[in-house]
Amino acid sequence: MKSIILASNNKDKVKEVKEILKGYDIISMKEAGIDVDIEENGTTFEENALIKARAIMKLTGQITMADDSGLEIDYLNKAPGVYSARFMGHDTSYDIKKLEGVKGSDRSGRFVCAIAVCFPDGREIVKRGTMEGLIAEEIKGDNGFGYDPIVYLPEYGKTSAQLDPEEKNKISHRGKALALIKEELDKSEELYAEDNDSK
């Protein structure tokens, strides 16, 4: 099976993707010896995922996967959205004060993840997954990363960061998007071309 480069240097994200896509040879940009900055100037999660996947695929000539994910808060007109990482800043500060006084279902929001896979033959796959929740009134949980400690999941009675990783991967935005991607990868002849040649 051919390797798939994951266009990310986020250690937590790389770990999560490798856990969800067990059985596939996923390698990070660092493991592939790639050190480039890619400007994510798309206006949607899908555009940004494609920008990253296309750039690394063109650079390496290898199958490349990239994701773009973030948090949409309905009360803030779906902000921070595609600007989630920049919105938080490098110190990952959670500005939940913007929702002070906002109660119940008015605190609705969701994690969104778009994943793109680009193949050297020009084929592209893009899938989206979401995880609905409420913006918590206080930060809770040590698992996960990013905004996980402030997204409360009513059906579980806890935040995303309070779920154990295996449980989270089954229901998360990234887990759902990767499950759809996996369906496509399982059917990909190009991914298994080397195996077929050697038989």
Image (cartoon, rainbow, N blue to C red):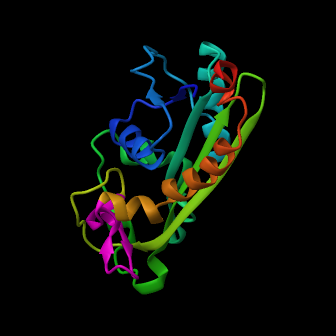
Residue, x 48% and y 41% (percent of image)? 23
Q: Is residue 137 left or right of residue 109?
A: left
Pick the front one: 6 or 39: 6
In the image, residue 154 lies in the stretch drawn in magenta: yes
Residue at the extreme front? 199
* Residue 155 position in % (x across, y down): 40, 82
Q: How many marks?
A: 0
Rendered view: 90 above or below 94: above
- For residue 30, say whether it is visible: yes
Residue, x 74% and y 36% (percent of image)? 124
- For residue 95, say whether it is visible: no
Residue, x 47% and y 84% (percent of image)? 105
* Residue 132 position in % (x across, y down): 50, 71
Pick the front one: 79 or 117: 117
Residue, x 55% and y 50% (percent of image)? 178
Q: Quadrant of the N terminus?
A: top right
Q: Quadrant of the C terminus?
A: top right
- The picture quadrant where one finds residue 47 is top right
Pick the front one: 170 or 159: 170
Residue at the extreme right? 122
In the image, residue 189 lies in the stretch drawn in magenta: no
* Residue 25 position in % (x across, y down): 48, 31
* Residue 52 position in % (x across, y down): 59, 30
Tell me which segment is drawn in magenta.
Answer: 148-164
